Amino acid sequence: MAKEKQKKLIKKIVENGGKQRKSMGRLMVEVGYSPAYAKNPAHLRGTKTWQELMEIYLSDKEISKKHFELLNACAIQHYIFPRLKEKLITKKGKVKHLGRFLDNKIIKEIVESVPGCKLIYVKRDDYTGSMAFFQAPDNRSRRDALDMAYKLGGKYAPDQIEVIKRKYEDMSNAELAAKIKVLKDFLLKR
């Protein structure tokens, strides 16, 4: 039964896209965990069954493969190189305006002078000029992948606050009850 709940929870997390649109605690309640247990998802993440399921659904090999793809992500973009305006004076003295296209070789040099960009093709249009389609680094995806790598590597400061050990934390319930009784007796002066 518990394994089924955990499978449902992992599927919910995957459906959620791994994003924190819903907290893990809320997802745990949705699949049938009690609200009290869902308040501390770390208990669930620490179980052997959870670790086994994570290895099946989100193995380190798969995560590394996707992470590598993100670090090298590219997007197709375009840029319009307008026609070059030139004046031509005819033999009769009339001014004629001509527009010529920029040479593909020059367009390629311009596009590929930008780090990581690679020209795919150039489309000519009499109205707009030359439209260059090129592959460029997807810097947003790359930034997110680097952020993830730093987090996984522990390079950032911790997000969690350390809990200070309390004076009576190591005492059992029976010892605490005895201590409370002694204090009550003292306060009531019995």
Image (spheres, grey):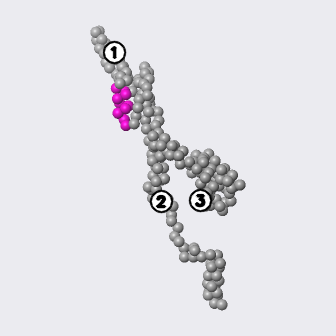
Report the front residue among 184 and 99: 184
Q: CA distance from mark 1 to mark 3?
A: 79 Å
| Residue 21 appears in the picture as rendered | no
Q: Is residue 172 above or below residue 190?
A: above
Query: In terms of sequence position, does the residue under pointer 2 or pointer 3 come before the other?
Result: 3
Query: In terms of sequence position, does the residue under pointer 1 or pointer 3 come before the other?
Result: 3
Q: Is residue 111 magenta?
A: yes
Q: CA distance from mark 2 to mark 3?
A: 19 Å
Horizontally, residue 25 falls left or right of residue 158, namely right
Q: Is residue 159 magenta?
A: no
Q: Position of residue 54 (x, y in %)?
A: 59, 51
Q: Which mark is residue 96?
A: 1
The residue that disc 2 covers is: 158
Query: Which quadrant would residue 80 be assigned to in this image?
Result: top left
Residue type, numbered disc 3:
Gly
Q: CA distance from mark 2 to mark 1?
A: 69 Å
Report the front residue among 169 and 107: 169
For this orientation, the residue located farthest to the top is: 92
What segment carries the magenta color? Answer: 106-115
Q: Is residue 117 above or below residue 126?
A: below
The residue that disc 3 covers is: 46
- Badge 3 local density, few (<14 within 10 Å), some, or many (20+)? few
Residue type, numbered disc 1:
Lys
Q: Is residue 49 above or below residue 114?
A: below
Disc 2 + disc 1, Cβ < 8 Å: no
Q: Secondary structure at mark 3?
A: loop
Q: Which mark is residue 160?
A: none
